[in-house]
Amino acid sequence: MNYTTWEQRVRKVEPYTPGEQPKTDNVIKLNTNENPFPPSPMVEKVIKEYNEDALRLYPDTRAGLLVDALAKRYGVDSDQVFVGVGSDDVISQTFLTF
């Protein structure tokens, strides 16, 4: 396949569009990670004890703790691990790379 044909095919890919939201209140959409239940008492405890000043800082753009943990878990170097901000970011970077 030549580059022109590949590029034409990629440009036909339609981006993700979110599904329709139900118009009634008695529906739980499990495919959108919605949860009808309140947080567990353990989560509420962590939230109350969490240092909210830490939320005011811009996050580590490298995601160093996560990258290093994944590298250790899978026995690779940290520079071999790619993480993104959601699947759209990873897909976008993949398209830009290839």
Image (cartoon, grey):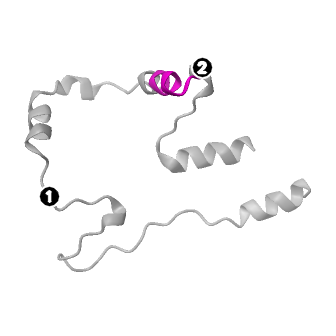
Position of 70 with respect to 51 (left or right) is right
Main SS, magenta region, reads helix
Mark toward the start of the polypeptide (1 vs 2):
1
Residue 49 % position (x, y):
10, 27
- Observer-nearest residue: 91 or 54? 91
Q: Is residue 17 above or below residue 20?
A: above
Magenta stretch, residue numbers: 67-77
Q: Secondary structure at mark 1?
A: loop
Q: Does residue 61 appear anywhere in the picture?
A: no
Q: In the rendered structure, does residue 37 fall within the stretch colored magenta?
A: no
* Up/down of 76 relative to 30, above or below: above
**Residue 14, located in which quarter of the rendered image?**
bottom right
Question: For the residue marked with disc 2, what is the amino acid?
Answer: Asp
Q: Is residue 11 left or right of residue 93?
A: right
72 is within the stretch colored magenta:
yes
Residue type, label 1? Phe
**C-alpha separation, residue under disc 1 versus residue under disc 2:** 40 Å
Q: What residue does disc 2 label?
A: 77
Q: Residue at x 51, y 49 (%)?
A: 87
Question: What label does residue 37 carry, if any?
Answer: 1
